Image (cartoon, rainbow, N blue to C red):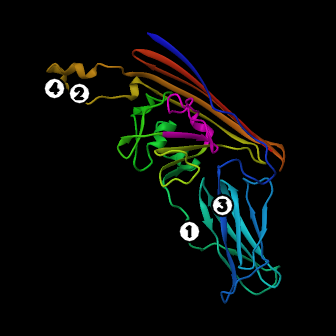
């Protein structure tokens, strides 16, 4: 029996930015136009974007054309508020920004006192009208709720047009499998928070990663913008972040040989097909993962960190992989 020990450290994310701004490329945008009930444009409207992903609200004013834009908005869920003297205050809730998403939020204001507040809850879903690329963005909800091998490579495999090497029941977790796009081998550009981390010597990721470290995984496999440095796949890994609230999670997953089966019937076995039962069957996979974050100084400095330990035992080998991640945002 061979024993292999591997330590993989996810790149530390250290962002020192002004309050309310986003770290590089882990972001989208919000833009739109404000008009009155007759369709006339309204300049001078105060537009405020607020949400738990911001250390301070983003505030802007509409131009003479009635247009406004927030080109850098971190990923998260936000409310957009519109205020102008002589008109009712309007709040549009539940604007979800994923990595690279451009959210058009137009608004019509009604004449009335600013003390009157109108909350828009039945508006049509926000659609990114500026999107020109193909690929997919996997949010934290998808990462946690869709049954997978808890392996970032298998999440990438869910992108239309992308094929990854098999990872049956998590047996290949802890190692990098091959990636292809649209049926052919592909150049792969790996990014962490928008910054390239590609291992140029092997055209691969520099390490394996802790699955619970990620808030989103974005994959582009066609029509990329100028930030995509080559053809093929562009993968952007977005880690979780601290907030003004202390929160965290702990996950333990386990499987062993008793949870496996085979498709060799008794008849085939008696006929001499027991060779189908040979190979490298799984004995045990155990994964421990914890993550925690919160404020150091509320509205000014947050922290977040994660660590995981994974043991995989098969008939021929035992491997142990430890992954850690940490970030600070001020």
Q: CA distance from mark 4 to mark 2?
A: 8 Å
Q: Sequence-wise, which precedes: disc 2 or disc 3?
A: 3
Measure how far apart labels 3 and 1 are at the Cα level.
16 Å
User: What residue does disc 1 label?
Assistant: 125
Q: Residue at x 83, y 82 (%)?
A: 85
C-alpha span from label 4 to label 1: 56 Å
Mark 1 vs mark 2, foreground winner is 1
Give 183 or 78, whichever is nearer the viewer.
183
Task: Tell me the crowding category of disc 3: few under 14, some 14 to 19, or many 20 or more residues within 10 angstroms, Cα based.
Answer: many
- Residue corresponding to mark 2: 264
Residue identifier under label 4: 267
Alpha carbon distance from label 1 to label 2: 50 Å
- Is 318 part of what is drawn in magenta? no
Mark 3 or mark 4: name the one nearer the start of the chain.
3
Q: Which mark is residue 29?
A: 3
Question: Is residue 180 rendered to the left or right of residue 301?
Answer: left
> What are the residue bounds of the magenta stretch?
188-214
| Label 2 CA crowd tier, 10 Å (few <14, some 14–19, many 20+) | some
Query: Dots 2 and 3: beta carbons under 8 Å?
Result: no
Q: Is residue 304 left or right of residue 277?
A: right
Q: Residue visible at 49% across and 52% down?
A: 136
């Amino acid at each position: 029996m061979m024993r292999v020990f591997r330590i993989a450290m996810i790149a530390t994310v250290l962002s020192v930015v002004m309050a309310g701004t986003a770290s590089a490329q882990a972001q989208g945008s919000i833009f739109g136009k404000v008009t009155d009930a007759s369709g006339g444009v309204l300049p001078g409207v105060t537009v405020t974007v607020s949400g738990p992903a911001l250390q301070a609200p983003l505030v802007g004013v509409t131009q003479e054309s009635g247009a406004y834009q927030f080109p850098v908005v971190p990923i998260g869920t936000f409310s957009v508020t519109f205020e102008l003297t002589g008109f009712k205050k309007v709040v549009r809730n539940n604007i979800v920004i994923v990595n690279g998403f451009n959210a058009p939020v137009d608004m019509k204001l009604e004449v009335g006192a600013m003390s009157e507040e109108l909350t828009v809850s039945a508006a049509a879903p926000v659609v990114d009208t500026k999107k020109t690329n193909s690929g997919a963005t996997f949010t934290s909800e998808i990462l946690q709720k869709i049954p997978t091998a808890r392996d970032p490579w298998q999440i990438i495999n869910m992108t239309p047009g992308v094929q990854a090497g098999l990872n049956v029941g998590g047996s290949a977790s802890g190692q990098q499998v091959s990636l292809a796009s649209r049926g052919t081998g592909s150049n792969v550009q790996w990014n962490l928070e928008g910054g390239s981390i590609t291992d140029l010597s092997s055209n691969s990721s520099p390490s394996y990663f802790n699955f619970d470290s990620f808030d989103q995984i974005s994959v582009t496999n066609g029509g990329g913008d100028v930030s995509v440095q080559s053809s093929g796949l562009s993968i952007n890994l977005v880690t979780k972040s601290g907030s003004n609230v202390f929160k965290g999670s702990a996950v333990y997953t386990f499987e062993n040989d008793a949870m496996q089966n085979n498709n060799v019937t008794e008849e085939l076995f008696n006929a001499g097909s027991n060779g189908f039962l040979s190979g490298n069957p799984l004995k045990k996979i155990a994964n421990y993962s914890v993550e925690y974050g919160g404020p150091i100084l509320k509205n000014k400095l947050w922290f977040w960190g994660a660590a995981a330990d994974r043991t995989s035992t098969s008939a021929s080998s035992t491997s142990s992989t430890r992954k850690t991640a940490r970030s600070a945002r001020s």
